[in-house]
Amino acid sequence: MDRRGFVKSAGLAATMLGVAGASTAASAAWADDFSPSPRTSMYRMLVPEIFAPLPDPADHVPAIVIGSGFGASVTALRLAQSGIEVAVLERGSRWPNDPWRDIFATDTIPDGRGFWHRTTFTGVNRIPLQIDPFGGVLDVTNYPGIDVWRGACVGGGSVVFTGVMIEPEQRFFDHVFRGVVDYREMHDVYYPKVREVLRPSVIPDDIYNSFAFVHSRAWDEQVRVAGYTPQRIDGTWNWDVIRAELAGRSRPSATVGCSNLGNSNGAKFDLNQNYLFYAEGTGRARIYPGHRVDAIAEEPGASGRYSVAVTKLDPTGEVLRTRTLTCDMLFLAAGSIGTSELLVRARETGALPNLNEHVGEGWGSNGDVALARPLSTLEVGTQGTPSASRILDEAGTPVSLENWYIPGTTPFDTTLLASLGIVLDDTRGRFVCDPADGRVELRWPADGAAGYLARAREVNNNAACNCQPISRPAFDADASFTSHPLGGAVIGRATDGYGRVRGYRNLYVMDGAAVPGSTGTVNPSLTISALAERNIEQIIRSGG
């Protein structure tokens, strides 16, 4: 295999790891382009559950939550616990888990189950592969200058991320939120509240010392030699399932480099196993897969009541039905991209004309950079997925590196180690809409990633220490896309300090769109969830 091509591919793929901005029920495409997959019969055989008849929500529901990722799941649970009937609308399918079945596509050889209605995917050899157009779990949206990766399934980003849950340093949190959100309140109350439900923990020593995590131990040793102290990372993994893999009691998944396209055996403790499960258990929250939200509007003559235009989709992409639902309270949690699209489109087409000028602004990539450096051991393992550790470098602009695996290859170690770099960066983009056709685009500054790419590469080179550099430095780092999209409806600007959209009653932003473009050198999932816990508590307590 050509090393230069491999490094480029590994860097790109490694950024898919923590998709914290999560799922969306809104489509980036304004028009449908249905063409059934030639492998539909195979998918029906492998995962018949996603082809079962889909339920329909009532014409009117007291509360609608758009999306089913971190912010959406928190919102749905707390509303249901307060006695409010909730409909959760998710464009993607609800995928099952099984210890032995081939439910999800593998990172190594992806197929239509892996991607949301794409026809090509570029693999490790940089040759575009044909992919069946199918309703897979990961959406890749291409914008000028940056590609955005996000979940498209029930559970959203929790299904396609790598489980990392880190609380940011207060100084970085305050730099991002600028006093709108009190860090001490988050630290004392809401981060712990999320941890109680998601139960993140560091990788146990027996798993860390197994053959699946040779790369993690080598990564830690390199950074120690370079003068850093690796810190163990909390992750939302079921370590007993991973032990079962190692012992041969489950089909291998998390121990052989699978995560970005789902873990068939349920090794990841995703939202289907906690927040969403508990919400449905109340009897007042119902989840509706295959329901894409295309537009929102305030009901004429009914201030504070909303209409929601919905397209019901088969996993093949076939349109089954179109409807307009209504609700008394509308919670936008379709991820940074989905929520921003819906709001910007509504403002520019006149459906919600009172939205302010901050809607669509303040979007950032969380300073994500995918990185690689040479492996300095001859020991061979199988590229286990959970991230074991991280380092933080504050010699310049703050940047963290997280120990990662290399997806999209055979599971065995190669000559490289992967890292995710997250830089405390202030580069921001904005969403714009053409009211003539309703299409929304993300405008990202030309060379918007140049500054944080250089800083992440500097720290990665420091961490490599006495290792031989990769022969082509241009291929040791990549910031051409992000799996952590944030912003577009920033808290305290587009909304008040608790996610209430300015200019409207009973309209809320509850997801990564509210976060000001960064979560301060860490993955966003914990902060998005804690912010949703904070905001929904205040909304319920105050009666809206």
Image: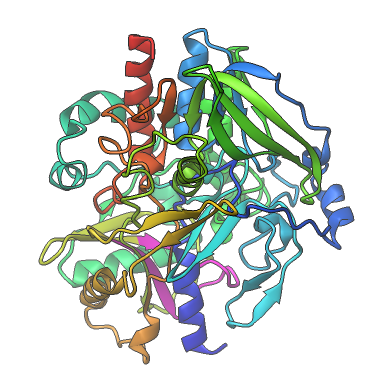
Q: Determine if the magenta segment contains residue 536.
A: no
State how many labels appear.
Answer: 0
On screen, residue 97 above or below 133:
above
Is 307 on the left-hand or right-hand side of 448?
right
Q: Could you tell me residue 3's position as x and y percent?
A: 49, 87
Report the front residue among 188 and 215.
Answer: 188
At a point 42% along the width and 37% down the height, the residue shown is 511
On screen, residue 385 above or below 315:
below
Which quadrant holds the C terminus? top left
Quadrant of residue 457 within the rendered picture: bottom left
Q: Could you tell me residue 431's position as x and y percent?
A: 42, 54
At a point 63% along the width and 51% down the height, the residue shown is 137
> Is residue 360 visible in this depiction of the protein?
yes
Q: Could you tell me residue 127's position as x and y percent?
A: 63, 82
Which quadrant holds the N terminus? bottom right
Task: Identify the residue at the far right of this view.
Answer: 41
Task: Identify the residue at the far left of this view.
Answer: 395
Q: Determine if the magenta segment contains residue 419.
A: yes
Colour logic: rainbow
* Region rendered in magenta: 403-422
At a point 67% along the width and 35% down the height, the residue shown is 310
Task: Identify the residue at the far bottom of this view.
Answer: 471
